[in-house]
Amino acid sequence: MRINYQLANYPLMLQRLVPGGWIAVTIAIALLVSTPVLFVLGNIFADNSEVWNHLAETVLPRYMANSLWLMLGVGSGVLLIGVGTAWLVTTCSFWGSKIFEWALLLPLATPAYLLAYSYTELLEFYGPVQMTLRDWFGWSSVGDYWFPNVRSLGGAIMLLTLVLYPYVYLLARVAFLEQCTCTLEASRSLGCGPWRSFATVALPLARPAIMAGLSLALMETLSDFGTVQFFGVDTFTTGIYRTWFGMGERVAAAQLAAFLLLFIFGLILLERWSRRQAKYYQSGSDYSPMQPYQLKGIRATLASIACLLPLSLGFLLPAGLLLQMTWENAETINDRFWGLATNSFILAVITAILAVIVAVVIAYGVRWQSHIAMELAARVTAMGYAIPGSVIAVGILIPVGRLDNAIDGWMRGTFGISTGLLLSGTIAALIFAYLVRFLAVSFGTVESSLGKIKPNLDDAARSLGHSPTSTLLRVHAPMMGGGLLTAAMLVFVDVMKELPATLIIRPFNFDTLAIRVYNLASDERLAEAAAPALAIVLVGIIPVIFLSWQIAVRSHHR
């Protein structure tokens, strides 16, 4: 009887002992992940007035102005395209609407800098568009006609809008699908037409989701490096890179990064303040599918064009151009290409596995022990996605460099041996940067998947003598298989596309597909960059299709 009593109380003992361990591990992870950000913020008050004053008098106003114009332009564009197309495919029936439901997400697979390279090849003076116009109209030089310069602030706004509108489209469409049918039907019964129902009912209810998508798009806009650098648009990200490598001023680069970080935090706080105490919810429970509006004639044609245009410009046209250039320059696909692909694949796989493991530890810790310290740690680890890769790179390299120098100095003084740089410019530092940047993606997916498992399963496992770790491995993990795979896949693709952090931290003579595309495009060798660029696009399509399929299945079962 004594043995049985001890066995019966074994889960209870673990329940009392283990939470402390989960809390300690979670807080340790949060501190580690937040170290680069805290270090960048700590450099705000560093004594570097001479260089900072020079930057403030020369380039800082331009960085601020261009970044603000980018935000305004891209924000307006993604709202118009994302919300408009989401409402059309959700509530209207027209030619191609079922295809557009998932196809409008495809631009997510194309990094903005790839669009920049593709459209430059297409629209430059010796590109096919301008050459065709000169042949048609007999023009011989630039003085004979005017053509918009794609390498400009306006061009950057257009291309970033085409790539980032799916953030708003995705969240807005999910919000429209989840809206209560009786609410919209009531607005119709009161005499509201489709546009008035949209403006007065659907749009206010979907506002939180739309603003969340807009915030993601704006953060990605401020984080972009490849597009604005290639187009010669000076923003904070290009300024950080130029100050670090061009001027050799690491502290000044950290201060610029801190300034950008405060700018992003201000953006997040502004969005939350705009909502203040407003609540957006509906009390009905009728979620049956609503009969769509049947569009015919000119309305159906205009709706199809409105959906086809961003899809064509944001994915079909650049992907087709990359495919054509790859086919015409197939001889450039050599062993070096496969080596770069291997490097990218290894980095992405290692980061994806680590991100899923860390996310599971944090999410399960929060589930096991709902503690304010756990909640705060979880939120801290998820803030990296709002921080540009260049900022994270600066926040990692400076303290790591100081640590390397300290170790080297100690080894020299103690043993007369120089260790050199042990961590700076290594794959470990690069993977850590990826983990800081994309852990939020993994954590959000894992947390959502874990939240769907009923708590009574935890109690049942404990009553059978399973420890928290055993419960996680034997009960939760099999049920979370789809969520874990999704999290790993999203992190994998994000790592494949990441440019600024890779560009700054990567080891010497260790390139990835993204770096190869950037280097070739910088040298105006766009045809040779087509194959690695197309590989990045093809890899990015996988999670987009998977995500589209999940949304379609969920809406079908509602």
Image: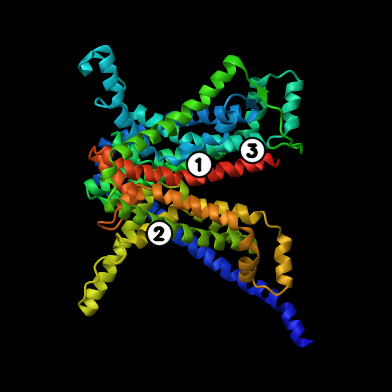
Vertical side of 271 occupied by 339: above or below: below
Vertical side of 354 occupied by 182: above or below: above
Q: Residue placed at 50% from the left, 27% from the top?
A: 308
Query: What distance separates the C-alpha of mark 3 from that of mark 1?
Result: 16 Å
Q: Quadrant of residue 332?
A: top left
Quarter of the image with the N terminus in it: bottom right
Circle 1: residue type: Ile
Horizontally, residue 67 falls left or right of residue 335, namely right
Question: Label 2 crowding class (10 Å Cα cut-off): few <14, some 14-19, many 20+?
Answer: some
Question: Label 3 crowding class (10 Å Cα cut-off): few <14, some 14-19, many 20+?
Answer: few
Circle 2: residue type: Phe
Sequence-wise, the earlier of marks 2 and 1 is: 1
Say which residue label 2 marks.
Answer: 432
Sequence-wise, the earlier of marks 3 and 1 is: 1
Q: Residue placed at 58% from the left, 43% from the top?
A: 549
Question: Label 1 crowding class (10 Å Cα cut-off): few <14, some 14-19, many 20+?
Answer: some
Q: How is the image coloured?
A: rainbow
Query: What distance separates the C-alpha of mark 2 from that of mark 1?
Result: 25 Å
Say which residue label 3 marks.
Answer: 277
Say which residue label 1 marks.
Answer: 268
Query: What distance separates the C-alpha of mark 2 from that of mark 3?
Result: 38 Å
Q: Nearer the viewer, mark 2 or mark 1?
A: 2
Quarter of the image with the C terminus in it: top right
Vertical side of 458 occupied by 263: above or below: above
Dot 1: element: helix
Q: Residue placed at 70% from the left, 75% from the top?
A: 465
Dot 3: element: loop
Q: Quadrant of residue 377?
A: bottom right
